Amino acid sequence: MKSSNIGGQAVLEGIMMKNGDRYAVAVRRPDKEIEVSVEDYHGVASWGKVKKIPFIRGIFNFVDSLVLGMKTITYSASFYEDEEGEGEKKKEMTNQELLKEEKKEKLVMGLTMAFSVVLAIAVFMVLPYYMSGFLRRFTQSRMILTVCEGIIRVLIFLAYILLVSRMEDIQRTFMYHGAEHKCINCIEHGLELNVENVRASSRRHKRCGTSFLFFVMVVSIVFAFFITTESPVLRVALRIALLPLIAGVSYEIIRLAGNSENPVVNALSRPGLLIQNLTTKEPDDGMIEVAIRAVEAVFDWRNYINENFGTGGIESGVTP
């Protein structure tokens, strides 16, 4: 396996694939045709030397992924506004009205993102700390309480995934998520990018955002050991303040995992890969076609395979 450094995410009835500063969104429209949009995205992580500074680059990459993720999900959802009559309403608006509507949508998107981040911090960082506090009646060991806090955090995360995976729309999104991984695994194992080879490829990948979130939780346990203040308020405040650094460290681990087949690295990646069994599902051929269109819009996979596997590197019928 040779890392291609491309990545992406599932959107509503589609896939976003990103290669450097260029990304493509392929969406299966209500009329069953595939719409592909290609644009450039210059986020904060691409500024100057930021992308070369270990640990710091991970913080900005995380911010960029949130912004671009929300943007592409909103774009994919716009195709289904037409079914609800929203598209026709916009056609009747003047340019000034459309500009106001666009500003309103950006404001709503920003507020939604901010609320989501605050809610995630409250549920996955603050709540486990207070829940582990109930164990103080049984032990005063800071090490035991910190480990229990981490275990509670992981259990809440797994419970959340299990809960949302029962939603029909989310199940389809998880299928597109599987198609995204399968496409990347296909080309990173030197296989021709076609439906047959993608279908046979693995739907788990070490650079997945699910694995990143898992490492965030594990790394947060390690960092919590160094919080020695006796003030409960300061303990919570420091946990929140350390989140950017925790994200930066987790990013470096994911980056290393995606470029290494070291047995130790593979062992560390295994829990995240197992959790991906929940966040990815087997896609149908139509979803695979959408994922292939997204990849081909921003990535020359034939040239990549020739450079990394030799001119005869394009194979078929091999299951990674």
Image: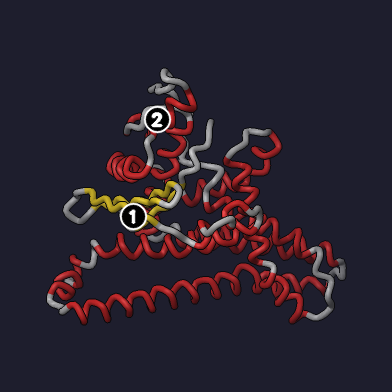
- The residue depicted at 56 percent of the width and 70 percent of the height is 120
Q: In this figure, what is the number of numbered marks?
A: 2
In the rendered image of this protein, does residue 86 appear above or below residue 52?
below
> In the displayed structure, would residue 238 be above or below residue 257?
below
In the structure shown, which secondary structural element does the residue marked by tag 2 occupy?
Answer: helix
Indicate the quadrant where residue 97 lies.
Answer: bottom left
The residue identified by callout 1 is: 39
Is residue 198 something one can see in this rendering? yes
Q: Which mark is residue 303?
A: 2
Q: Residues within 10 Å of mark 1 (few under 14, many from 20)?
A: few
Q: Position of residue 241 (x, y in %)?
A: 68, 72
Type of amino acid under label 2: Asn
Q: Is residue 184 above or below residue 63?
A: above
Left/right of residue 178 with respect to residue 149 in the rendered view: left
**Quadrant housing residue 318:** top left
> From where the camera sits, is residue 154 visible?
no
Of labels 1 and 2, earlier in sequence is 1
Q: Amino acid at mark 1?
A: Glu
